[in-house]
Image (cartoon, rainbow, N blue to C red):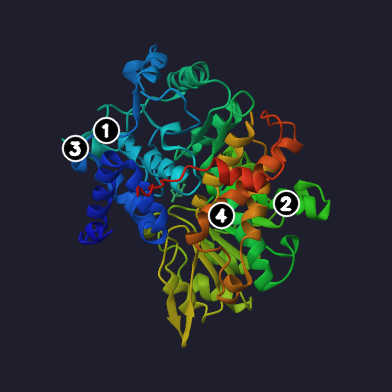
Amino acid sequence: MHNIRQYQLPLQRYMAMMDLQEGNERLFYKLLIDNVEELLPIVYTPTVGEACQKYGSIFSRPQGLYISLKEKGKILEVLKNWPERSIQVIVVTDGERILGLGDLGCQGMGIPVGKLSLYTALGGVRPSACLPITLDVGTNNEELLNDEFYIGLRQRRVTGQEYADFLHEFMAAVKQNYGEKVLIQFEDFANHNAFDLLARYGTTHLVFNDDIQGTASVVLAGLVAALKLVGGTLAEHTYLFLGAGEAGTGIAELIALEMSRQTKTPIDECRKKIWLVDSKGLIVSTRKESLQHFKKPWAHEHEHVGNLLDAVNAIKPTVLIGTSGKGQTFTQEVVEAISSFNEMPIILALSNPTSQAECTAEQAYTWSKGRAVFATGSPFDPVEYNGKTHVPGQANNAYIFPGFGLGVVMSGAIRVHDDMLLAASEALAQQVTQENFDKGLIYPPFSNIRKISAHIAANVAARAYELGLASRRPRPKDLVKYAESCMYSPIYRNYR
Ligand SMILES: O=C([O-])CC(=O)C(=O)O
Ligand SMILES: [Mg+2]
């Protein structure tokens, strides 16, 4: 740590950590686990975002497996080149929507690498069982196409049938090479592919979309915890989203599902408590014809409303959630408006990295006069306001996917079911202690994450067994203990 801390810039610390991961994997994980709150912002958001933007110019050696269009017809052979045979989790991206930073092509590799290092550090999945993959289908990022250090194919993205065929070959090759029980996590695909891929492969493969499902599960947990501070039930609140992509619609759907279970009301009714704003304004039924399919369930009856501020004033939400990927969109007027009709507005600025956050922690607390229950996707420091310290929570899917994946792997689950996402969410919400609530926190600190992950894994596995989706026999009696016993630990032995 002394060595790492000598670097001033986060990007230099990132590079030093990546060198360590390559040269001394055990020490890398030992450091990451023992200093998780300090190092998470380095190996993960926000620094990993900057690293992806500069990936070509900081490149020293390849991490993960690149599969390019040139390898079409030979994807199985390429997979066989990976030295490890026994793979449990794959994180795959095509780099089209890296965090809120847009199309970074092949340079998106930093994301699968970073996510999988958290699978190991936070969730205890063995490093050798993790496989980061980037599919190189081109990029539409002109700057990268003209960058002499760009590491990927210099061509525009393929789309349509060609894209679908390439993905299909990849999915079939993974199943053929690693069997049914490898978890495939889709990460940072663009909206127009992410929903389709999940729908297409959800019934034939063990797939999980972190941006849709992982984010939904972590946000639902935060909301359930927030209700302890704010009062009311899920169904008694009104939700307004800025952003109607993977995160926005994924979260909205899981909230509606949980609401529907709690109130025994049809999900269609529950959806009416949830409103979404996209770049054209409030999503309303008169726009239905022109909406992408994943937005249609959210097109409720309402007159046209052109922007977020007007939507806040028209809908009067108690919960405001930013998933737009665009920074500084929760303006002072917006935060003051929601604070004018809520004693404690719940405000989540989820877009990553920090530069894309809808507002900063300081803005949220200042503009709400210290009343907001606030969390962000990327980490923010505590803020002093009127003599009180406010600690923003980090509503990031990193709380969920490592434990979720461990639960899937350890139970031998063959499919991901929405109930397993709810199970993960419940387990996370239960880990928020009175001490956390007293500080206004709706998430537990990351310093306890391995214990939290074990509880998430156990609850997910339990649900998988109940659903008949778990193949490991016999079912372990104490699933929390079993989860802990499965976790990789970078232990240094004492030699006497
Ligand atoms: O990577 C993160 O920090 C969360 C995430 O999935 C995203 O922003 O796409
Ligand atoms: Mg993501």
Q: Can you give x and y, in whole percent of width and height, for residue 442 in the image?
A: 58, 66
Instruction: Decide which of 317, 67 is in the foreground and name it.
Output: 67
Q: Which residue is mark 1?
A: 62
Instruction: Decide which of 203, 334 is in the foreground and name it.
Output: 203
Q: Looking at the image, is 367 positioned above or below residue 387?
A: above
Q: Which residue is mark 4?
A: 451
Q: Which residue is mark 2?
A: 258
Badge 1 or badge 4: first in the primary sequence: 1
> How many numbered discs?
4
356 sits to left or right of 123: left
Q: Which residue is mark 3?
A: 147
Q: Looking at the image, is 310 positioned above or below residue 95?
A: below
- Residue at x 70% of width, y 64% of height: 237
Local packing at callout 1 (Cα closer than 10 Å; few below 14, some 14-19, many 20+) is few
Local packing at callout 3 (Cα closer than 10 Å; few below 14, some 14-19, many 20+) is few
Local packing at callout 2 (Cα closer than 10 Å; few below 14, some 14-19, many 20+) is some
